[in-house]
Image (cartoon, rainbow, N blue to C red):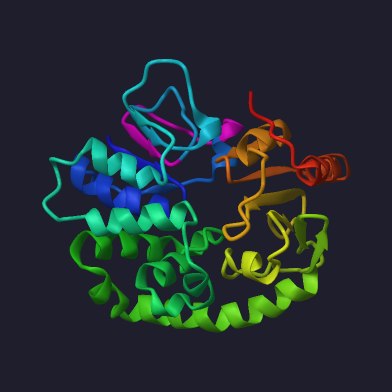
Amino acid sequence: MKRIVTRPDFDGVVCAALLYEAENVKGPVKWVEPNDMQKGLVDIQEGDILANLPYDERCSLWFDHHHTNRIDKPFKGAFKIAPSAAGIVFEYYKDRFKRDYSELIKETDKIDSADLSLDEVLHPEKYGFVALSMTILGHDEYDELYWHRLIDLLRKFDINRILEDSEVKKRCNAIIEKNKKYKKILQENTKLKGNVSITDFRSFDKTPTGNRFLVYSLFSEAVVSVKIRYDNDSKEKVVVSVGHSIFNRNCNVNVGLMLSGFEGGGHRGAGSCRFHVSKAEDYIPKILDILLKNEPNEN
């Protein structure tokens, strides 16, 4: 039985929309986090189509674009360093699609590679795809029905029609209000250390969410941002997310490569790691030290 396995972000949702059509998949998507894949916690089966996630040898097809997920063994599917995994899926199956997905792929490439203007970051409500991408937060499994709804909408309609959907409209409006509050929370919980902005949300019972690009506009001196939070209510695991500034492009550190040494991974310009809380006092200062030195870490 074919099954799509991907992560709950905009790129993952678009990957799923394409794969449903290209591979004629019938069942629901299995949504997983990359860190769970890396630690072997996901039951991957024959017939599974992995997208936007680390490779697992039990799958039948694999599509990805993350620097730290590259493998040196034969596999079915496609891998290359690219702006989005959806773009790789689109190219692989380009003759199988009945709809023209070129605009969707162009926008997914732009959003997943954070190739955004200051106006798009500050006023996402003016840019349909940007606003839509922000409604997919990826932290709440209870949103699975919404993710599947988006997949269905992306397969049928253009962005203007999608934005008229009642649930999408409600979530886009909520995101605009949430971003206003998130801006204030960021300012109150972020400190600038050298060329690094450090946002620590561990004091919150529920981690604040909002526009992930906003921090770059608020702390223009920083070349890289670090966000620290707990994984869930149990507070047993800490998540550290790191991203090159999209406006001050002077970070020399390959983030994905760096975080692969701290139980994580990602792209050259962005990534995350998830580890037991007991390792926080060891890992976090080491990550910050590497970023503050801002030295290239690639051969």
Question: Percent from the top left, x then y, of residue 44?
Answer: 44, 32
Q: Is residue 186 visible?
A: yes
Q: Main secondary structure of the magenta part?
A: loop
Residue at 72%, 59% in the rendered image: 222
* As drawn, 113 above or below 140: above
Q: Residue at x 76, y 64 (%)?
A: 201
Does the rendering let one see residue 28? no
* Image-quadrant location for residue 192: bottom right
Looking at the figure, which quarter contains the N terminus? top left
Image check: 132 left or right of 246?
A: left
Task: Examine the structure image and report whether residue 82 is included in the region drawn in magenta.
Answer: no
In the rendered image, residue 91, in percent from the top left (x then y), is placed at 25, 39
Q: Nearer the viewer, residue 19 or 199?
A: 199
Q: What span is colored magenta in the figure? A: 38-52
Residue displayed at 44% across by 37% down:
65
Q: Report the label total.
A: 0
Furthest residue in direction top, as rendered: 73
Asked if 5 appears above or below 245 in the picture, the reply is above
What residue sits 31% from the left and 55% below the top? Answer: 106
- For residue 279, above or below residue 248: above
Quadrant for residue 144, please give it: bottom left
Left or right for 17, reference 207: left
Indicate the quadrant containing the C terminus: top left, top right, bottom left or bottom right.
top right
Q: Is residue 40 magenta?
A: yes
Residue 297 position, x and y percent, is: 69, 31
Q: Position of residue 196 (x, y in %)?
A: 76, 55
